[in-house]
Image (tube, rainbow, N blue to C red):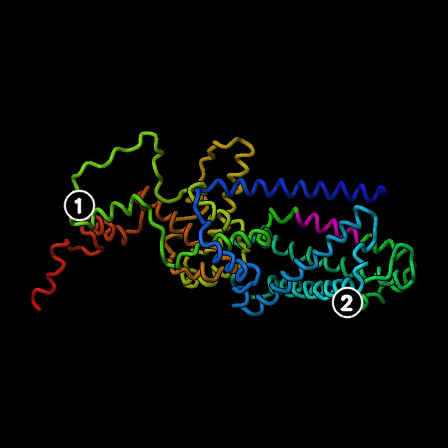
Amino acid sequence: MGIANIVFLVILIAAGGAFTYQVSKIRRNILLGRDVDRSNRKGERWAMMTRVALGQSKMVTRPLAGIMHILIYVGFVIINIEVLEIVIDGVFGTHRIFAFLGGFYDFLIGSFEILAFLVLFACVVFLIRRNAGTIKRFKARELTSWPKNDANIILVVEILLMFAFLSMNATDYLLQERGADHYIVAGAYPVSSLLAPLFDGMSTEGLIMYERGAWWFHIIGILLFLNYLPISKHFHIILAFPNVFYASLTPEGKFTNMDKVTDEVKLMMDPTADPYATPPPADPDAVPEKFGAKDVQDLHWKNLMDAYSCTECGRCTSSCPANMTGKLLSPRKIMMDTRDRLEEVGRNIDKHGKDYDDGKSLLGDYIQEEELWACTTCNACVDACPVNINPLEIIVDLRRYLVMEESKSPTELNGMFTNVENNGAPWAFPQADRLKWAEEL
């Protein structure tokens, strides 16, 4: 093992360790949320994950963006099989260790090259579309500064990685033709061979230097990109699969009810119930239950996983009728705010300990009441999300806190709440008068 292999091994271990450390922090942050059981109906969950996350079924509802995204997704995943060979070569000082596969190896390398070109093409189209296009969801107020730069960084890095891969193969192809030592004849190069004339005038030593430079640039770029994922929206390429798997299987539009509230309503609606009956003794050690959510710890862990899985594509916002009519609500901002607040809570834990209270909360400091009450609960955002994120659950829980903990709700709703409490119905008539309308029939 030479010095270059030792350096490579140290870099590989350091990059793997740093990535593991970052992922462990994200896992800790997600588990700050309340527990919720999403382990049932596993067959349906596997089928949904295969269809939505692996099959990208919801992406193609918008064909141009969907097809381009699938090219990047498939290319990114399959081309990284090549990384396995690069890592083995880097550790042991070999070159194209899988060349013994013969014709199948030629097929693999050729396929990787075609996919790399398609990924490069799709990234260039996305870069132009995002920055020079007029698509409204890319110009929203929540998509400025870091989120906008993040998207551009990802696209530029992918373009550079794909170019490094193709130019590395182009020089390798020329070195194979010249019979250079260490460069065994292996692989097929349908794309990089077209780039070969750009390097044909270089000496053999120059070609080796360029090929090695591109090799190091490619693998170091991948390892750096791996550690960029946890601080980027691109982390969805990892979390999309568990996020879809654990998505709610209840029909859209069916809300979760709190057991205690449900019991009270049933008692109120039961004509045989004794309203003056002595309630069962309360558990003196029980922690008082909070109604709804004020901060990220009040949400359940799947809500928090949703926040880390958000691709920031904006399909939810562009489908939201409230946003379309100029209301303040943007479901994408709800998810981005939840993730930003969760990250802030995580940093506070790292710095001050688990019980530190910074006096801030998701509701109020990040998400405003006007945004919440603009929601029509139509589920359009949930339906549009390509990775089954549910912003509506967060909106409803924050609303629930406003109404049930702080008694803050729009004036129009207060009268309805009073009627439900007093009359068991949203109308301003007692139950005894409900059939009076039929007396004169």
For disc 1, the neighbor class at 10 Å (few under 14, some 14 to 19, many from 20) is: few
Q: How many marks?
A: 2
Label of residue 406 in the image: none
Q: Residue at x 54, y 67 (%)?
A: 60
Observer-side mark, 2 or 1, equals 1
Q: Is any atom of residue 139 visible in this view?
A: no
Q: Which residue is mark 1?
A: 273
Q: Which residue is mark 2?
A: 191
Q: Residue at x 56, y 43 (%)?
A: 26
Which image quadrant is residue 158 in? bottom right
Which image quadrant is residue 64 in? bottom right
Residue span colored magenta: 215-226
Q: Nearer the viewer, residue 176 or 47?
A: 47
Q: Residue at x 60, y 50 (%)?
A: 232
Nearer-N-terminus badge (2/1): 2
Which quarter of the rendered picture does the C terminus lie within?
A: bottom left
Q: Residue at x 81, y 58 (%)?
A: 100
* 94 w.r.t. 124: above or below: above
The amino acid beneath tag 2 is Val
The amino acid beneath tag 1 is Ala
Q: Nearer the viewer, residue 314 or 440?
A: 440
The percent position of residue 31, horizontal first and vertical second, equals 50, 41
Q: Nearer the viewer, residue 263 or 224?
A: 263
Q: Is residue 157 left or right of residue 138?
A: right
